[in-house]
Structures are given as C-alpha cells and as structure tokens.
Amino acid sequence: MESGSGGWAGGEACLPAVEMALEDVNSRHDILPGYTLNMTNHNSQCQPGLAMQQLYDFLYKPPTKLMLLTGCSPVTTVIAEAAPVWKLVVLSYGGSSPALSNRNRFPTLFRTHPSANMQNPTRIHIMEKFKWKRFTILMSVEEVFVTTAKDLEALARKKGIKVDRQSFYGDPVDAMKTLQRQDARIIIGLFYVTEARKVLCQAYHHGLYGRRYVWFFIGWYADTWYIPSPEEHLNCTAEQMAEAAEYHFTTESVMLSRDNAPAISKMTGGQFQERLTRHFQKDTANVGGFPEAPLAYDAVWALALAFNCTRNNLPPSIQLENFSYDNKIIADTLFQCVKNTSFRGVSGKVMFSDSGDRIARTQIEQMQGGKYKIMGYYDTTSGDLEWYNKEQWLNGRGPPPDSTVIKKHAMTVSNKFYYPTVLFAILGIAACFVIYLFTNKHRDRLIILQSQPECNNLLLVGCSLCLFSLFLIGLPSDDIFIPDSVFSILCHARVTILLFGFTFAYGSMFAKVWIVHRMGANENQQLASRQKDEPISASKFYVIVAALAAVDVFVCAVWILIDPLQLTEQKFPLLVLADSEEDEMIMPVLQQCQSNQQEVWIGIIMGFKCLLLVFGTFLSYETRNLKLRFINDSRFVGLAIYNVAVMTLVTAPVVTLLIHGKVDANFAFISLTVLICTYISIGLIYGPKIRHIIKVPPSADEVQQNGNVAPAAMSKVDQKRYDMLKKENETLQLQIEERERKIHECRERLDALTNNSESDDMNSHLLSGNNKQITDENMTYSTATTLTTTIPLIDLQNGNHPGQIYEHENDNDEDDRSSTSSDEILL
Ligand code: ABU
C-alpha cells in the first residue's frame, strides 16, 4: 500500500480508512449478520512483482480468501489479471489506470477509484477556456499514464488541439530538454509524486516555469508534495521547488462527498474526514492517500454489501464460507452483487459502470502562494464547468500563450519613400496633362506641326502610365494594407501598366529614330533628300508602337493565362522584440508576386526590352546628324533614348539581383528610374518646343513657312553658325560696296583723263593695261579679278533647309577669270 521507489503511497491513509470501515461494517447487525469481516493486508509498495509474490503467499495460506482489495494501478493490474484464475473478485480503491476498464483483460475487477480518463475532458475544457491550441504531455512510462495520455490525445485531436508527447522512465532530464527544444508552454504532467518532484526540480533548472509556462499536475498528490525529501537527493531547495510550483493547476476526481446527507455509514463526507484525521498526528495534507481514503472506506462497504447480497442470493445449500477458488456459483453470484452495488458512500454515490468504473466530478485547483485554491468543478456527464474565476497568473496579465507568439510583419514600403514618390508621380502626370493641353492649343505652330504631335502624345500617355504604376509598385506601404484576396490583381496590374507605359513612351521615341534612320539610310539618295522635306503620316509611328504593344499583349496574355502571378511570402529570420515581456517574436515576411516560371517570363520580357533599348540607342547614334523637317526633334529624342537606355539597363540588374528582398531600396531604385526617365524624356522633347512657343510669336513661324530659315527648328550650334555667317555676309557686302564705289571713282577719273585731249596712243596704252598698276595720289588699286577668298554664301531664300549652308568656292581659274566679271561673282 505504500510506494517503493516510486508509485503511490496511498496506504498511509487508506489502511486506517479500511480498518475504520471494517469496524463500522462489523458493528452493523443488518449487514452480514453472524459474520465478521477480516482483512489480511500486505504492503506491496506499489511494486507489481512484490505484489504477485505476496498474492501467492496470501492465497495458498489458509483461510480461503473471498475477495481481493487493491491499491495503486500497477499492482491492481497484475492482481486483477491473475485473480480470475482463483475465481476471485477484485475491488480496487486506488487504481486509476484507464487500462483497468478493459473487461476482457480484467473480468472480475471493480474499483471505487474513478478512471484517470475522467479528468481528460476537464483538461480539454480548460484548454478551450484559455484558448490554448497546443499542449505537451510529459509522462512516466507506466501503463496508467500511457493510457491516460492516449485518451487525452484523442480528445484533443477531436477538438483541433495539437498535442506533443514526451515520456521518460525514472529520470526526466532528457525529456525536459526536449520540452525546452520543442518550445512547450502548456505541459500536462502524468507521473507519480516521486517523479513529479524530479520534474519540478528540472523545470526549475531548465527555466521551464514562470510567466510563460503553465503546468498541470495530478491532483491526488499530498498538498506539500513539492517539498523535496532529503532521501531523494534532489538538486533543488524547498524554496526553488515552491517557486517553480507556483500557479500550477491540478485536476482530480472528487473523492469526498460534500453532501450534507449522511452516507450508508451514517457519516457525511466531512465527518468521515474528521474521524480519519484523528488517526494522524501530523498535518493530513502530507499524509499519502488521504484524498483517496473515502474510496478505500467505501470499497469495504461495497464489499460488505456485496457479500451480504451474495449470502442472500445463494441457494440455501451453499454458504459463503463454502467458497473455494473453483466455486463458480458463489463467484458468479458475488460478481453480480458487486456489479449491482448502489449506495451513498462518504465519497459520493457508489455504483459501477459496465466496465466497472466509477463516475465522478472533477475538481480543478491552482497553487497560489503555496496553497491549493479550488478553481471550479467539471461534470463529465453533463459537460458543465463550474468556474469561480479565481485563477491567477504571474505578473497579473491573463493566461500566457500556448507557444511563442510569432507575429508576421509584412515588409512594406516605408512612408518616407512612398509618399514623396507618389507626389512626384502625381506632378509628372499633371505635367503630362498640362503639356498635352498646351501643345494641343498650339497645334498650328510650326514647331509642333513638324514634331509628330500624335507620336509625342503617345509619349505623354506612356509616361503617365509609367508614373501611375509607381502607385501600385509601392503597395503595400506602411499605411496601405492590401488584402491577400486582391494581391494577385495588384501583381498583374502593376506589371502590365508599367510594361505598356514603357512601350508607349519608349516606343514613340523608338519609332521616330527608326523612321529617321530608314530615310537616312535610303539607297536612293535623291528620293531620300526629297523625303526629308515631305510630311510623314502619323500612322507610320502608330504601326511601330502598335507592333511593340502587340508583343506585350501577347506575352502578358500568355503569362497571365498559363502561369498567373500569385502572392507568395518570403520569410526572414525571427526577430525578438526588445521591449516585449510577452512571449512574442516578429517574423518579417516579404509579400511577392510570383509565377511558377517567373524567371522565364522575366527573361522573355527583359530580353525583348533590352534588345529594344540597345537597338534604339544604336539608331539614335546613327541618326545623330540626320534631320527631317517633319521630325524636327529627332536629336532630342535620341538624347532621351540614351537616357532611358542607360537608366533602365543599370536599374534592371540592380533591382533583380543586388537589392532583391530590400523593399525600400527596391522601390526607391525603381521609382527613381521611372521618375528620372519620364521627367527627362518629357523635358527633352517638350522643353524646347514650349520655350519656342512662349518666346517666338506665331508671325515668325509664317515667315519661316514662306521659305526662310526657321531658326526654331535649328539646334543652338546651327543657330550660332547661322548668325555668324549672316554677320560675315553683311561685312562682305559692305566691303563690296566700298570697292565698287572706288572702281566707279577710278572710271570717272579715267574718263576725265580721256577727255583732256591727250593723244590716242596714250589713251590706248592706258586702256589695254588692265593688269597694270595705276598710281594716283600715292594710292595703288588693283582690279577685282584677283579675288581668291572662299566666300560663303547663305541661301537666305531657301527656307526649306533651315540652317543649311552651301559653300561656294571660287578657285583661281584663269578661264573663269577671263569670262566672269567681278560683279557677277559677288552677286
Ligand atoms: N489516486 C491514486 C491513483 C494511483 C494509481 O492509479 O496508481
């Protein structure tokens, strides 16, 4: 009845209770009149081997025994398995093992002790009450606990609660380490009290106690069970054990009737306890088996009533004292009588189910300040929990979580990046809109007319789309949450909008350099030079942009249809919150748009765009000196293409390879690229036009239309050269006028000389010496036929070639000199 190296030391209180019951029964004349019940007892120390040896001695020594009374589960198990051999009924007051409910294995067993399974619904109910969805069972490898754990696990699974199980035999150190590794927080301990102390001590040393942990122990330990006894040599002091034991819960079947109505023994539960307490000199809280003593007392009453019933039900020829270990009649009658037992005991109503189990309520207690306080009762039959709301938690904050709370933290674009980007994007879109209105208003101006305004409008649309895509690329931001259900739509929207924006913006510029290049590269130079001045249909540009957009439409459609983008979460290492006392950790999660074959799709799109960028850059370089009248901004377009190509070809690998996973850096890089590309492109294409429209009045355009040079269509360099040559031309004109004046004077003087009646010889001599020097008043004149300077003439009338300069070289040809007068050359 007492525990040996482990087990349950219930005999300490149960033996006096049994003796009390025998005394009470034997004093009753209405029960077994003429008989006196005797008991022979042995202390099996809860060791099955010792118990079996004692059983053999016990049975083979006279007198013949009529019934067996057993204590703890391991002993009850072996005794109850063997007892049918001797046709003996076994009544257990201390066996709680659920395995004992197996009628096939233990055909003659009854018990006044409720099954340990009885507490499992209570445990599950408490888990639900405190919203714990996970717990761990720590158990000693004994059948009583293994079967209890199995039942508990099955119940938990039905309720969707996750259960881990750890078992140990003797030393719990390894199991405790595993609990620590598994991050167990709610732990249900199933073991005898000796192991319970070892577990508590290890819990103290492993830090598995306190605010984060909740322990559930079996409720039938003595109240001061956690105080270590010197002979156990635990490596923990009583204070440490008390500290670790604080706020643990216990569950145990109610074993003492709280009813005021007296039991069959004419005592109430309370009166029984008072009477029993008088047997002990020490505090009953520390007496082994004191809680189970009413069960032992009632077991004797049940036994006595069953004998009484058997005596009354046996045929007149058979007496109880005729019982032998092969007497089936008496054995069967006794079995039926025990089975039909029903009386009010000091432990409550005593009756047995078909499997021989006792039905009882469960009491839940919590240790608060070193004392057990009743928290409530659970009625297994009705499923009702009577809860007094007296539970306490360390630090006064409600129940702890059942595991480390891992809070997902979506890595979003921070506001300090998102809002400035949005602001610039809005400004950019507004600028596009204003520019469209402005150019549309001045659509009749030559500088607009000759710049392919339809194509430029596509640029504005494309830039606006690119800028708008930044709103979506920056989501989710710190302030803007995107529900998972719409994330996929967001993924597709931002990819397609950016893609089409790029195609419209870049495509419109690409179309211009392409057409300029085509015309410049035309083998028929005459046709090429004629085409230079011919208007170009907008449809040519539309076709090129539409072709590029068609590729996008095709790729996007196939992508979305066969391998759509989905929300995926990339998880990063857990972070501990520095200022959190609660059991919380942060898991950074990067929400991404991902396809199964993401790399393939990115490769196709990026490859195509890269080719376009490189090809566009090549065309821009090739056409840098070519100019078409009706694509008057081709040089600026070329510059914009260089800019877009460089920015994009740098950004794409940086974003995809180097800063992948860094949300802010990624967004900043993309948005800067988009903003710079769009702002610069718009600036280059529209800046000069707007400046010209503002500075040059429309009337100036008319003059140019009539054939003059259109300065606005020239580059700055051309304009300078034009101004310089114009000045030079004016200077030369003045010089010519001066020389003409002097020639005129010479002629006049010559005429005067002729008229002065000089001889004819003299006259003829003078007139034939065209190349000879004429000296007059210390001055020397030479004729204009000696002019050898290269004179640039600017065809001011040929307005079809703005800034075009023709160089006309007058070489010193003798033939020309003889046939052409100086006047003709200068004109
Ligand atoms: N209440 C004591 C149970 C002991 C045992 O089942 O072994």
Image (cartoon, rainbow, N blue to C red):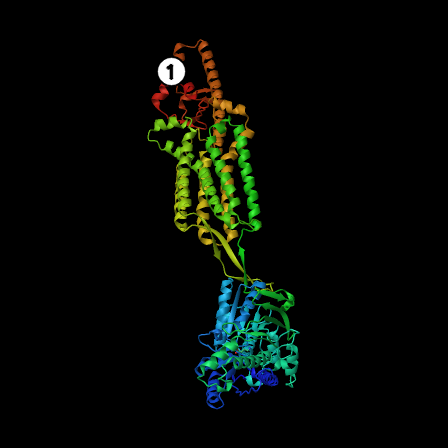
Q: Quadrant of the N terminus?
A: bottom right
The image quadrant that residue 693 belongs to is top right
Q: Nearer the viewer, residue 206 or 662?
A: 206
Residue furthest to the bottom in view is 62
Q: Nearer the viewer, residue 148 or 392?
A: 148
Would residue 513 be seen by someone viewing this image from the given angle? no
Would residue 48 be seen by someone viewing this image from the given angle? yes
- Quick one: label 1, few (<14), some, or many (20+) residues within 10 Å? few
Please tell me whether mark 1 sits on a helix, a strand or a loop.
helix
Is ligand 1 less than 8 Å from the beta carbon at label 1?
no
Residue 464 percent across, percent down from the top left: 51, 39
The image quadrant that residue 527 belongs to is top left
**What's the residue at 38%, 34% (across, down)?**
517
Residue identified by numbered label 1: 768
Kind of residue at badge 1: Ser
Q: Quadrant of the C terminus?
A: top left
Vertical position of residue 14 compared to residue 363: above or below: below
Q: Nearer the viewer, residue 543 or 484?
A: 484
Residue 131 percent across, percent down from the top left: 57, 62
The image quadrant that residue 218 belongs to is bottom right
**What's the residue at 58%, 73% (across, down)?**
252
Residue 173 percent across, percent down from the top left: 50, 76
Q: Nearer the viewer, residue 185 or 673?
A: 185
Residue 396 percent across, percent down from the top left: 65, 66
